[in-house]
Amino acid sequence: MKKILLVTDAWAPQINGVVRVQDAHIKALEGRGYAVTAIEPSQFRTVPLPFYPEIRLALFPRRRIAKTLRELRPDAVHLMTEGPLGWAARSACRTQGIPFTTWYHTHLQLYVNVRLRGLLRPINALLRRFHGLAVRTIVSTESLKRELESLGFKNVAVVPLGVDVELFKRNPAPPLAPLPKPVFVYFSRLDPEKSPEEFLKLDLPGTKLVIGDSVDRPRLESLYGGKNKFVGFKRGQDLVNWLSLADVFVFPSRTETFGLVVVEALACGLPVAAHDVMGPRDSVTHGKDGYLSDDLREAALKCLDLSPADCRAKAETYSWERSADAFVQNLSFIQ
């Protein structure tokens, strides 16, 4: 049985795309007979990340990671994130002569730039340094691969993501009170890099449903609660039930590398109104299962005429099984 060591700074109870990708891949890999060991924040003393207190940063992890590498002797090492655990594992692998792969999941430089201007170039340089020693750096789309290569990243490989189409399937009779139609839904974190205020300010008919949370939610709800129905984070079938009340998914984020929520919405038969940017551009067919535009109000209203069946059909082209196959093929197994 081959052993895969996964090192990640993102882990439950965090709710984000990295955690969802990990969960899906670990399940698929174990189903194929691989033994997956994860090094994750709960195994260490941690401190909260500024602006994102739900994310915990591990303190002084290098010695324990180095010990794990020596004792476990994994067949492949993969670094999912560029946080303290990722950097410590990178250093330990370098010292012990162990090849590793990495994954570029998130435009960290764009996230930081939303809050602290002027750091794009130094963070880009730091990310190039982190990924520069990897045998391969994995990304989720061809457009992200091209962008990173234009910035000087080497050995970039694409592993497409998936969606659980058995879970994300519209419930024709959700156990919830109906909302005035049409229902436009936003579901994601309510952090600035996701641009939730752009949705909250939109003048749309019917109901605007807001699924998500953050430390900024009280302020947003006090400003926009009258015209928007906030219901907090939802998970699993509860999330699907709320999405089943909706007619259109509106996604204002301009900082995505993929945007798993887009294909999750499509799987529930929801057309997507989004900006013509990386992420939505890679998964939405303009005019068929969504509209891409700078004018989100116009795009959202036009989505009301699109076919839920076409949206569902698009989502069914995304498979976690194929994703896991591509992931394994791009790992660097020690001979």
Image (cartoon, rainbow, N blue to C red):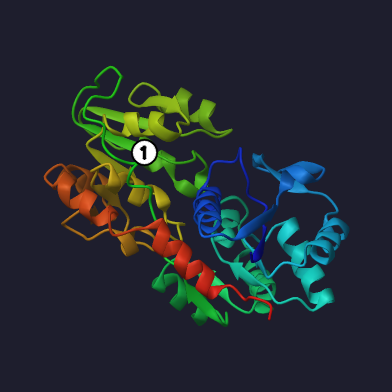
Q: What count of labels does the image hold?
A: 1
Q: Kindly indicate the quadrant of the structure image that contains residue 161.
A: bottom left
Please state the horizontal and vertical placement of residue 229, each as a whole percent of the image: 36, 24
Packing grade of label 1 (10 A; few <14, some 14-19, many >=20) is: many
In this picture, residue 154 sits left or right of residue 92: left
- Name which quarter of the figure residue 335 lies in: bottom right
- Seen at 41% across and 59% down, the residue is 321
Please report the residue visible at 77 percent of the width from the left and 45 percent of the height from the top.
43
Q: Quadrant of the N terminus?
A: bottom right
Residue at position x 36%, y 40% in the image: 167
Q: Is residue 253 visible?
A: no
In-front residue for pair 82/135: 135
Q: Position of residue 178 (x, y in %)?
A: 24, 20
The reply, left or right, for residue 231 in relation to residue 63 is left
Q: Which one is nearer the viewer's eye here, 304 or 204?
A: 304
Residue 162 position, x and y percent, is: 39, 56
Tag 1 residue = 186
Q: Position of residue 88 (x, y in %)?
A: 79, 62
Residue at the spot 54% in from the left edge and 41% down from the top edge = 15
Can you name the residue that lies furthest to the top here? 177
- 135 up-or-down from 90: above or below: below
Q: Is residue 187 above or below residue 24?
A: above
**Residue 148 horizontal side relative to residue 164, left or right:** right
State the SS at label 1: strand
Is any part of residue 95 visible from this angle? Answer: yes
Question: Observer-nearest residue: 320 or 14?
Answer: 320
Vertical side of 144 occupied by 10: above or below: above
Name the kind of residue labelled 1 in the image.
Answer: Tyr
